[in-house]
Image (cartoon, helix red, strand yellow):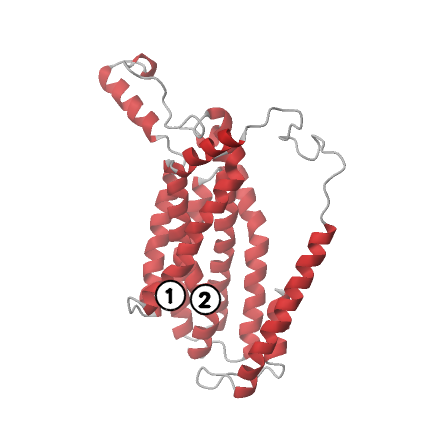
Amino acid sequence: MIFNVVASNLANPDALAPIKGEFSSGVISRFPMVLRKLSFMYSLMAGLGCLMMREPAKITATWFPLYDPDGDKPSKEELKEKLVACLTSRRFITLCIMAWLAAAGGYTVANEYRTFGQAASVLRTDAHGRDLGVLCAVANGLGRPVWGVLVDNFGIAKPWLLLAIMQTGALGTFYAAATSRSLPLYYTATIVQFFCLGGGWAISSTACSRTFGDVANLVFSYVFLGFSFGSATGPALMNLAGFSLQQTLSFGANLAIISGILGMTYNVNFEGLLLRARAFLQGCHPDELEGNVCSIQNPYLETIDELGEDDVV
């Protein structure tokens, strides 16, 4: 948010509007200088942050109620075994696909909103684009606690479905707002997209911590692959497949709908459902089925203790 304003003031201090979608040569010539100054600022802030990091003198249950410093810690071999089991599980694959499909349209808007808005003459001044960038950053950052509260109260599936519905509506509104040159509607559609992008990160990280136990942090690093594929989908469609921006946004809306449907299946224990169906057809209890050893697919993932009540069918 702050550096959006800083970068705009450094590159375009006079807030000159683009002419036919292009800035003046003076603005363009300042761009390398802006990148150098921003990289210095980022490096300085990162260095100061590292210097201020400290291990707590004593870890207490008040700070970390789930942390047991005297408890048994799994060996590297056990962690590796668990990580491999998690990365090959249905839930991890589903979560990655959910992230990819939800991020495809959102990152297309994030990549194109300023350029497209200026070309469509809905962002008539550079200040419009700068202010929209600031509001989008606020929505993305402050929206994450909101999504976190929703997950705490309603589980994974319902907030993800809500996210998909909001994304679909915003993607459908984005292009129409630009072509009609409605600045308030264009602001709203873009801000909602950034709000949902933040929600994707918040919900998926919580899904990892609830599902994958003591390797959740490692698993979440692999979920980044889904978001990475999502950010590359829009440019690939436009540059390689020849899609227009309108076609790409429509395709992204369809992907968001599929992502919402997948989100509704994330907590479903399909093996348990099939087991119950077999038991119903045979007129017995699932525990009475011959050859039934366990009604879960993976002992590391889908236990009631690790998932919580809202994640168990």
Q: Relative to 195, does residue 214 appear above or below in the rendering? A: above
Q: Is residue 34 left or right of residue 115?
A: right
- For label 1, the SS is helix
Tag 2, which secondary structure? helix
Which residue carries the number 2 mark? 111
Asked if one can make out residue 206 in the rendered structure from this viewpoint, the answer is no
Per the model, the C-alpha gap separating discs 2 and 1 is: 9 Å
Residue drawn at (50%, 83%) of the image: 23
Q: As displayed, is residue 142 above or below residue 290?
A: below
Q: What's the residue type where badge 1 is placed?
A: Pro
Q: Return the x and y of residue 310 as percentages of the image width and height.
A: 47, 32
| In the image: residue 200, left or right of residue 138 | left
How busy is the neighbourhood of tag 1: few (under 14 within 10 Å), some, or many (20 plus)? many
Residue under the point 31% across and 22% down: 276
Label pair 2/1, CB-CB below 8 angstroms: yes
- Residue nearer the viewer, 48 or 26: 48
Q: Position of residue 112 (x, y in %)?
A: 44, 69
Please name whichever residue, 301 or 16, is drawn nearer the observer in this view of the structure.
301
Residue 267 shows in the view: yes
Discs 2/1, front: 1
Q: Which residue appears at 71% of the width and 48% of the height?
A: 53
Percent of width and height locating residue 279: 27, 18
Which residue is disc 1 drawn over? Answer: 235
Quarter of the image that includes the N terminus? bottom right
Picture residue at 57% right of the left edge, 64% below the top: 135
